[in-house]
Amino acid sequence: MRTVDSSPGEAAEPAPPTGSDPQDGHQAAVAAVAQHINTVISPLRELDLAETWPDGGHGTGRGAADASL
Amino acid sequence: MRPYELTLAEASEAVGKGELTAREMAESVLGRIAVVDPVLHPYVTVTGERALRSAAEADQEIAAGRYRGPLHGMTVALKDLIDVAGLPTEAGSRVRAGHVAAQDSTVAARLSQAGTVLLGKVQTHEFAFGVTTPQTANAWDHGRIAGGSSGGSAVAVATGAATFALGTDTGGSVRMPASLNGVVGFKPSYGLVSRSGVVPFGWSMDHVGPLTRTVRDAELVLPALTGYDPEDPASIRPVPRPRPAHPEDGLAGVRVGVPVNYYFERIDPEVEAAVRGALAQLAGLGAELVEVEIPMARYILPTGWGLLAPEAAAYHEETLRTVPELYGPEVRLLLEGSGSISAGDYLRAQRSRTLMRQAWARLFDEVDVIAAPTVPLTALPAGQESVRWPDGTVESVLDAYSRLTAPANVTGVPSLTLPVGRDHAGLPIGMQLMGRYLDDAGVLRVGHSYEAAHSPGRELAAVAA
């Protein structure tokens, strides 16, 4: 917690192991994350989407404007 | 009972009757923050003087007969993704260090119009991309995660360090920490509450919602947040319907769907037992339990990630290129990896969501709500990175905690979590109630009925000074 006028502070990132190229290690870690996400979404490529349209993202096609409050 | 221990409904009634002043309420909650924050760290910024000024103004207005409604004089904390004019919005990230909002977000403005007293900003997992909020400790076990990304909001409410709070929910970030800290969290229907002035995570699944001590409190907050906002392209024009029967009337005629797939797979047995116990209690209130099959279950997480990853990567594209070193290592990796999703996969996810929304709409022809665990397990020890299930499956903590909450973000249906029990270690367990799109009141009604009969969610977490 801080008061509204004080400055933020965060711990520094951990240093990479001595002798390694931090950029190589980082790129490998990014590739691993990318592979994981692509593996997770891969079932979409088997889904029969036929003539289904994309929903256009936010703001369209979300149903009748009749909320129960 | 001290003022900070009151629920929103109780405090509101006391202030409305002149039995408690807003100033007394604010002083009590600020005193509680002074005890809680050094131990659990839910707050980023506390605006104590501003809160006391607002409370004094509320008292003057109420004394003059200008009572604004049930939120007048009530203390609130806002997740640090939500803009308040003149205050920092840093999203838990050095990338946003020094950012000060020029104007109120729509929800902050609406709460101000309702007469609330802003206590300050509460912690978020960096840019909402995570489920632990490592800056903050769990309210019930200080060695465990607060949950996320609205971890500060949940811990503040669970400890009495705010009467209520707002969070954001893109894959479960209101409901998940609410469940892990034993409070109520509500993700409204997509488009019902404006996101204008709120730092985005994934535009097409972002929601803003309240965290409260009780379902009744959530019912009081929601109307103040809703209303068409041209600044949010997803905003809808709600048309209030007559309220349903009073919750104490029971649940006769309400059909509660109990999933036979997906929601009870790979969950902790104690979580399953607590939720099935709550289902029996709903039946005892007159609800009809109906087994339902969750449609397209295999495609829920692929669709969610297929939407979220490219949207998050797109929002962060420029700063990832110019100041990548300012991101925390975990979120930087997630965002950079998220940039690998192709346009074709993003469109597949959108088309899948079209089918999924249609299938869920048909599901809600069969039942009024679906009841399920909110998350598959209670709060994990801080620092644990993965979960191994008895079937040998290993899941990242992020995937495990978002697996059961994400469907309501993909489909946009309203979803409520409320406490229904504790595990052997005393950690809270939540049950999730989902309803048909825009039947937010119906979902809250079922939750309120359960709460009125069983009321397990009122206890504040003890925090030693």
Image: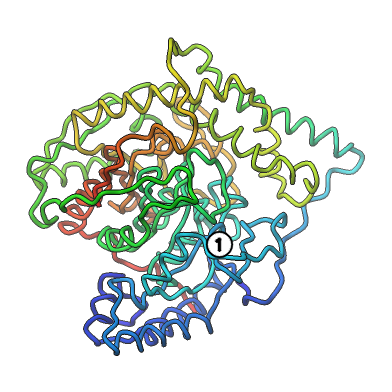
Circle 1 sits on which residue? Answer: B83
Q: Residues within 10 Å of mark 1 (few under 14, many from 20)?
A: many
Q: Could you say whether the residue bearing mark 1 is in a helix, strand or loop? A: loop
Q: Is residue B21 above or below residue B102?
A: below
Give, as a three-letter code, the residue at label 1: Asp
Name the residue at the front extreme.
Answer: B230
Is B275 situated above or below B1? Answer: above
Asked whether B38 or B175 is in front, the reply is B175
Q: How are the colours assigned in the image?
A: rainbow
Q: Is residue B376 visible?
A: yes
Identify the chain of the residue marked 1, using the numbered disc in the image. Answer: B
Q: Position of residue B88 (x, y in %)?
A: 63, 66
Q: Position of residue B85 (x, y in %)?
A: 57, 69
Q: Residue at x 41, y 57 (%)?
A: B181
Q: Residue furthest right?
A: A19
Horizontally, residue B248 falls left or right of residue B34, namely left
Residue B270 visible, this orientation: no
Q: Position of residue B186 (x, y in %)?
A: 35, 51
Above or below: residue B92 compared with residue B415: below
Out of B444 and B396, give the one closest to the viewer.
B444
